[in-house]
Image (cartoon, rainbow, N blue to C red):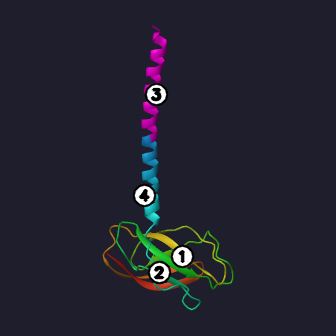
Amino acid sequence: MNKKGITLSINMVVILILAIVTLGIALGFITGTMQRFIDRFKEFPILEIEPTLGDPISFIPSDIQRGRDNKMTIGFYNNEQDDVPNTVIPQITCEGISEVTVKASGLNIPVGSWERYSALVSVPKDTPSELYSCTLTISQTEKTFFMEVK
């Protein structure tokens, strides 16, 4: 009886099982990571009012939870002299808040058209809960509003 053939078969089966298990773990990890990434940018609020020439910035919501990323949809109508390049992202400054962080991808917005930013907005965890006067700036356009921090 030839034992080399049997040993090769057992080794091949063990390697095949290990390969399948490793592939399953890798696919599970990649799928889970991608799903979290997609979920992070999914389900942003839908703008109730689109931005216009007269009111070039619209957004929803205007209240956020402190110490975490909050999903905010920001619409911008470009009524400026030049196209807005994708290096421009919305900025928010508020009186009484040391730092408001806005994470968003830049968009190319030609003059006379509008686009929607999907942004993650956060304020420090130690920010007191109250209503703050804020300014939202995109390129050279600004809008003042009140933001409630909860």
Q: Closer to the observer: label 3 or label 4?
A: 3
Asked if the residues shown at circle 1 and circle 2 are in contact, with their CB atoms under 8 angstroms apart, the answer is yes
Q: Earlier in the sequence, mark 3 or mark 4?
A: 3
Per the image, label 3 sits on a secondary structure element best described as: helix
Per the image, label 4 sits on a secondary structure element best described as: helix
Q: Earlier in the sequence, mark 1 or mark 2?
A: 2
Amino acid found under the numbered disc labelled 4: Arg
**Picture coordinates of residue 40, whole percent (x, y):** 44, 63
Report the magenta residues as a range: 1-23
Asked if the residues shown at circle 3 and circle 2 are in contact, with their CB atoms under 8 angstroms apart, the answer is no
Q: Earlier in the sequence, mark 3 or mark 2?
A: 3
Task: Return the mark for residue 57.
Answer: none
Outermost top residue: 1
**Picture coordinates of residue 26, whole percent (x, y):** 45, 43
> How many residues crowd around disc 2 within 10 Å: few (fewer than 14), some, or many (20 or more)?
some
Residue assigned mark 4: 36
Residue assigned mark 1: 116
Q: Is residue 5 magenta?
A: yes
Q: Closer to the observer: label 1 or label 3?
A: 3
